[in-house]
Amino acid sequence: MNNCYLWSRYVRSMDIKHHFVEKGQGAPLILLHGNGENSDYFVGQIDAFSRSYHVYALDTRGHGKTPRGEAPFTIRQFADDLLAFMDEHHIGKADILGFSDGGNIAMVFAIKYPDRVNRLILDGANLDAKGVKSTIQIPIEIGYRFARLFARKSEEAARHAEMLGLMVHDPDVSPEELAKIQSKTLVIAGTKDMIKEQHTRLIASRIPDARLVFIDGDHFIANKCPDEFNRAVLDFLGKD
């Protein structure tokens, strides 16, 4: 099989089958999208990164083409799903790049399974809801309460409540836990990110020897500023 050909398929991970996109050769680089999104978010990254890496872009449980399954819908469950995916593909250790909730998954994964992470890129990640600007977080919490009210009567409301619940209750990581991350880490965010700047700086300061980069833009710098974002990531990975 030619690994330079872009393709997608399903692989069983615990009680689900992950949908993923794969391209390139070399060391594995796993991309994790944000809340309510799918692997398409990384349309500006897959080609660029696959010139030097074997890229896997996953659809998280209950996102994109990956089914919901029966397991808990939490960041920690998603981290365990990632472990199962890596085991299934005999990926002992990988570089992992996560955006937003994907960054939170990557962060929790690196804390729980430090020996499975080579290098870590956290893009727009947060430790808890307090790290999100109030102008963003307050509407999320109001929407979550309303969705929960109708969750028993509407499958759509129930699904919406689960998605919003991730941004209300998760990832619930303490700054002290970040010291458990052993991998070389890049913390990156937009200058106008929905994550508070001081919160992003806190994350970088608590991860040993982490590199901190801000790119002019909002929360979606990878999608809106792909060239600058990709340069920062590849510089960090040593493959610019």
Image (spheres, rainbow, N blue to C red):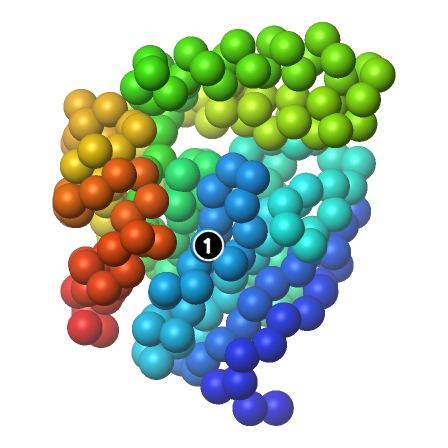
Residue receiving disc 1:
41
| Residue 47 location (% of width, % of height) | 39, 74
* The quadrant where residue 132 appears: top left
- Image point 56% across, 24% down: which residue? 164
Residue at the (55%, 51%) spot, across then down: 38
- Residue 234 drawn above or below residue 191: below
Which quadrant holds the N terminus?
Answer: bottom right
Q: Residue furthest bottom?
A: 2
In the image, 21 versus 148, the foreground residue is: 148
Find residue 91 and report its horizontal and vertical position in percent. 53, 66
Q: Is residue 23 above or below residue 162?
A: below
Q: Quadrant of the C terminus?
A: bottom left
* Residue in view at x 69 percent, y 54 percent: 65
Rendered position, 230 above or below 104? below
Q: Position of residue 151 (x, y in %)?
A: 76, 17
Q: Secondary structure at mark 1?
A: helix
| Residue shown at the point (64%, 10%) measured from the top left | 146
User: In the image as oriented, which residue stretches furthest toward the right?
Assistant: 153
Q: Is residue 93 visible?
A: no
Amino acid bearing label 1: Tyr
In the displayed structure, does residue 193 sit left or right of residue 160? left
> Eyeballing the image, is 97 above or below 204?
below
Q: Residues within 10 Å of mark 1 (few under 14, many from 20)?
A: some
**In screen coordinates, is 108 left or right of 205?**
right
User: Is residue 200 shown to the viewer in this render?
Assistant: yes
Say which of 181 and 163 sits in front: 163
